[in-house]
Image (cartoon, rainbow, N blue to C red):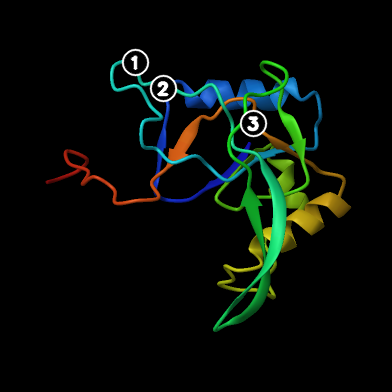
Amino acid sequence: YAMQVDAHLEFVKSWDSDIISQLDNTANPKAVLTTYLTDVAGSISKTTGYSNRNTVPVMCQSQFESTHMGTYLRHGSQPELKPPFKGVSILSPYFAAGFFFSYGEFVHDVPYDVNLPMVFQGEEISMGLRGFTKGYDFYTPARSVCFHYYGKRPMLRGRGGE
């Protein structure tokens, strides 16, 4: 398997077996589960460790955005929705670099572009286009297995020191 995530995430209990099951359920050897993640606030039960949500974030829009570094294409996401079919991942036109999970062949078939070292803006477009041209399909996961800290993160203690 291959996975890339942002560093500032929190995973639900049994996330690993769940995401493998979701990938297998696509019945597609060139499936990539990928999306922009929901904020962690209120998303994970403090008592069970499982997700409190029955919705998934869906990427379904793009726009050009300008900064001091230039203009680039940026993906956005719709408000979360209940999956139309329980337990089924939804095809999506976009690749999200902050979370993707696939079979290991993906990183062999679609390696990071050595001509774009340290790229941040544009990585998603590059990986998405090259993945698509290699026959990969992108899916919104049927269930969220991790959530993103968009605001201030709590200080982590007890993990190798105080």
Q: Position of residue 66 (x, y in %)?
A: 62, 76
Element carrying mark 1: loop
Q: Is residue 162 left or right of residue 42?
A: left
Q: Which residue is found at the position 38% from the left and 46% from the top? A: 149
Name the kind of residue labelled 2 in the image: Lys
In contact (CB < 8 Å): disc 1 and disc 3 = no
- Residue 123, by quadrant, is bottom right
Query: Residue 36 — which label?
Result: none
Q: CA distance from mark 1 to mark 3?
A: 21 Å
Q: Earlier in the sequence, mark 1 or mark 3?
A: 1
Q: Residue 45 location, x and y as percent?
A: 35, 22
**Label 2 or label 3, whichever comes before in sequence order:** 2
Residue in the image at 57% along x and 46% along y: 36
Q: Are marks 1 and 2 in contact (CB under 8 Å)?
A: yes
| Mark 1 vs 2, N-terminal side | 2
Badge 3: how crowded within 10 Å, few (<14), some, or many (20+)?
Answer: many
Residue 48: mark: 1
Residue 112 sits in quarter: bottom right
User: Tag 3: residue type?
Assistant: Pro
Alpha-carbon distance for marks 1 and 2? 8 Å
Q: Label 1: few (<14), some or many (≥20) within 10 Å?
A: few
Tell me the residue at 60%/53% (across/down).
97
Between tags 2 and 3, which lies in front? 3
| Residue indicated by mark 2 | 13
Image quadrant where residue 154 sits: top left
Task: Give the residue pinned by disc 3.
Answer: 141
